[in-house]
Image: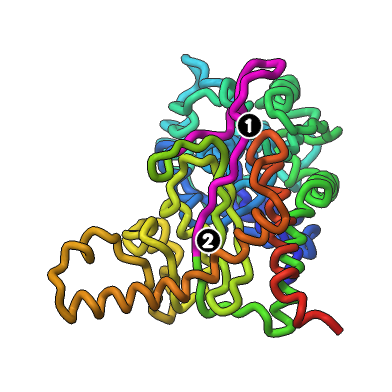
Amino acid sequence: MNALRTPVVFIPALLCDEPLYGDVIADLADAIDPHVMLSPKPRLEDSVADVLARAPARFALVGTSYGGNLALEVALAAPQRVTALWLMGCNPAAPQPGGPDLASGLEATPGAVFDMLAGLVVHQDAVAAAAVFKTMAVRVGGPAGAAQARALGVRQEATSRLGALTMPALVLWGEDDALVPASIGRQLAAGLPRAQFQVLAGSGHLPTLEKPAESAAAFRHLLEKNALPQALLQEVNARLKERGLLMSQGTLIDATLIAAPSSTKNKPRTRDSEMHQARKGNQWHFGMKAHIGADAQSGLVHTIVSTAAHVSDVSQTANLMHGEETCVGADAGYVGAAKREEVRTKLQGKAHELKWRIAKRRKPIKQMPECWQKDLALAYEKLKASIRAKVEHPFHIVKNIFKHKKTRYKGIGKNDAQLNVLFALSNLYMVRGKLAP
């Protein structure tokens, strides 16, 4: 896979599957690593958990109609994992009472509902697109469509929460959308801090099906404009791997706190809403966390995840693994990582068994009687700590040599972009001697 390809999760509209995005994915084949995900569950919350368990550690997110509402909830649940957001034909407001019972119709007479929707979801002249929609609807089926419709019918409003989504966003709307008017899209874009709004002439409710070339061009522009920091780290690591300096057999994981200004002496009289306070030992800190996955042999960073400071270290274990490891090392803050559902999901289907080298908590060893078993346990913990120490070196470079001990920007997104650049540079710094001519 090209190191510069951006992982992208595509969530289709109601009764749609892969062909909804087929032409767009083909157009962007050189730039994206696509993952089309269907999760027809009766509650959006259940689908959110399912999508996050299957998605890459960090990804751009695309959703249309029902898929747009689900994409919003995914982004709100894990904003630190979503690098960019592309929404089409979705309404962030709460469902209006008294609407048609689409779910019951899909269960009782799915064929009639398919025909009815085919005449609404695309522009009146898009006969071929309507035929593709009907084919997708038959393949997805009435029961799955009914589950999707029920999830939409009981969704929470998202309008008041849009301000939390600070990643770059594209809101693309069909000018002739008969289901959700462009005015809704314009309001949606206005609520997202970093969104651009674009209307496609001659398109209805499904722009990627009706105007794939124009849709792909708009998304490519969004990616090229905003994904450079993440791409830089990927490109640097690809070059280091070519030279045999970055391996993939083992991963060391850790996190560090980065302080953010806690003062409210500013115009809005508030602290950064995306930062949080957390206690380390007996001291409280306000800011964010940089979680990293590093190569066990060289200590070079291969994955970065940025979160608010209060997010637990162990919760990011799966996101910091690239999936090809044979062993994972971490400190005692990651005890129990192997039992977490998202970690088990990531490791499903792997041919090799993963070895966990997690430090034991101090208290059980301290309570052991003085004997050879305690000496052996202490020696083993010392050995694990000596291997694990490599993951501290990138933090030393970024915080002490590059002097990055405090956030420079507001919001997780901008600071995450800077951290991607800094850790890419720290990788080059660590192997500068081997790269010298």
Circle 2 crowding by C-alpha within 10 Å: few under 14, some 14–19, many from 20: many
> Which residue sits at x=63%, y=70%?
300
Q: Residue at x 79, y 65 (%)?
A: 30
Please, is residue 147 above or below residue 9 in the view? Answer: above
Residue 419 placed where, x, y %?
Answer: 68, 52
Q: Secondary structure at mark 2?
A: helix
Closest to the observer: 209 or 142?
A: 209
Q: Earlier in the sequence, mark 1 or mark 2?
A: 1
Three-letter residue code for mark 1: Pro
* Residue that badge 2 annotates: 320
Marks 1/2: CA distance?
Answer: 27 Å
Circle 1 crowding by C-alpha within 10 Å: few under 14, some 14–19, many from 20:
some
Q: Residue at x 48, y 48 (%)?
A: 39
Residue 25 place in picture, x, y as percent: 73, 57
Amino acid, disc 2: Leu
Residue 261 tag number: 1
In the image, the segment drawn in magenta is 253-278
Question: Can you tell which of label 1 and label 2 is closer to the viewer?
Answer: 1
Tell me residue 132's x, y (percent): 67, 50
Q: Is residue 48 above or below residue 105?
A: below
Where on the picture, by quarter, is residue 283? Answer: top left
Q: Where's the N terminus, which quadrant? A: bottom right
